[in-house]
Amino acid sequence: MPHNSSETRIQDPFKPWKYLLSPPLKLNFVSPNFMKLLLAICIFTGFSFIYFSTFPGQKWRTATCPECEQPLLHSTYRRHTNIVSAATAAHREKTAISHILFGIGGSAETWGQRRRYCELWWKPNVTRGYVWLDEEPKKPWPETSPPYKVSEDTTRFKYTNWDGSRSAVRIARIVKESFELGLDDVRWFVMGDDDTVFFTGNLVNLLNRYDYNQMYYIGGHSESVEQDMAHSYTMGYGGGGFAISYPLAAELVKILDGCIDRYAEFYGSDHKIESCINEIGVPVTREPGFHQMDIRGSPYGLLSAHPLAPLISLHHLDYLQPVFPGRNRVGSIKRLIHAYESDPGRVLQQSFCYDLTRNWSVSVSWGYNVQLYPFLVRAKDLSTPLQTFLTWGTWSQEPFTFNTRVLSLKPCERPIIYYFAGVNGSGSGKTLTWYRRPHPEQRRQCKGENYGAGYTVKGFNVSAALLDPGIWNKAPRRQCCEVMSGGDRVDGVVQVRIRGCNQQESVTPP
């Protein structure tokens, strides 16, 4: 039976090649009007292409798709543009101390003793913030102390840590209660304990390196590994202090109360805060200048080889030996602050150099001490802290979150130490600091010939230009120093000059 063409096409669907040879269809729709329309479309398309190539920032808009109102640009370009504009705005108006709101965890019972640390750095009518107490103080509040507020009742919150204190809940909520004060022009919330000493000039310079319009959580970890294991490696420890940017605080306060109950078993307020910030997805940004000081014994070894970073805070000073021998704890910090005020960024920064005519190694921790080794010591060893301390919890020899080297008991293997005694000349763009040996000398002396020459040195004078705070925005590099020849032959004082290293200079003893 014959089949029509449509049936053939249905029955032979896999042979399309047969119909490639069919007679062509007649294009009856090709008319002058059609050609005019086609030409108009081509002209419109061409002008559109030229326009949006010339002005890439323009947007395609549609009334039915508000969320589509975005530039037709790659997402990485948009992120880069946002970063540049935010950085430009931050550059126009730098963060100042007035942009920081401090929240200090304290108690009415212990403030009388702890206030002596806080009052070392707090400047009335300059520094902003509050000490948050558990109850109204029973004695008149000192004018030299920060103003105080009484925390809200926290009995409704859960706390199940058998070894801790419920005050952790109250202190964790300080950031929330501080935020809810609604104070103007706050960019950062900085939390600390009532025995934390902040070096606020360095803190301000540090925070200027970060965009306060972004969500940042900045702090440091514990020095003792056992503390990091018991609590967290990924949190800013509260005693050393931590900073939370305003946008992050705005998100944190929304979830904090419920979050505190979710982590009821955690020991400390800082661990609870870190866990809640983790739910927002923001990690801690570590800055080594925040010092929890989770160590026992003498801080001499740690402070003599400070990390290459500005000093931001010190904590646990009542649990450590005084920073300077022959002074009490508060007097020691006053002396360190005296050096800090002359050149904030340089305090505790280490430089070392060699006097090859006498085979001496000289290590300077600016504003703290000078260590003289009457023999050559490798640079890596000089930059590694001497272990003059034990771990926080178990009073053990190790481990720490940084390398240490053994402090020998033999007097012929120990450095001769000269401590900071004064500073002068900060108004001229330079400083001269001097360092002297403590009297009376408490350690046994080495009878070696090289040490005999070292003991004739009465002190060191160290000259340096004021450290530009902008140096911390560059790739870090320890500054160099040089021993000025003949300086100890006049009055027993060695002259040392700290300076920036030359381009191809290295500290390499023979």
Image: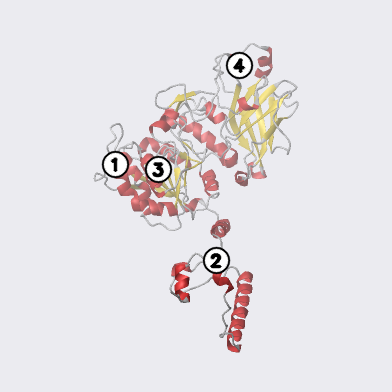
Gap between marks 4 and 3 measured at Cα: 43 Å
**Alpha-carbon span between mark 2 and mark 3:** 38 Å
Say what secondary structure mark 2 lies in. loop
Q: Are the residues at dot 2 and dot 3 in contact (C-beta closer than 8 Å)? A: no
Asked whether the viewer can see residue 199, the reply is yes
Asked if the residue under mark 3 is in contact with the one under mark 4, i.e. CB atoms within 8 Å, the reply is no
Which of labels 4 and 1 is toward the front? Answer: 4
Foreground residue, 73 or 407? 73
Q: Earlier in the sequence, mark 2 or mark 3?
A: 2
The alpha-carbon separation of the residues under discs 2 and 1 comes to 65 Å
Secondary structure at numbered mark 1: loop
The amino acid at mark 1 is: Lys
Which residue carries the number 1 mark? Answer: 138
Q: Which residue is mark 3?
A: 274
Residue 502, position as x, y percentages in the image: 73, 38
Of mark 4 and mark 3, the one earlier in the sequence is 3
* Residue occupied by mark 2: 72
Real-space Cα separation, disc 4 to disc 2, in angstroms: 69 Å
Q: Nearer the viewer, mark 2 or mark 1?
A: 2
User: Quarter-wise, where is residue 239 in the image?
Assistant: top left
Which residue is most to the front?
A: 1
Q: Which residue is mark 4?
A: 413
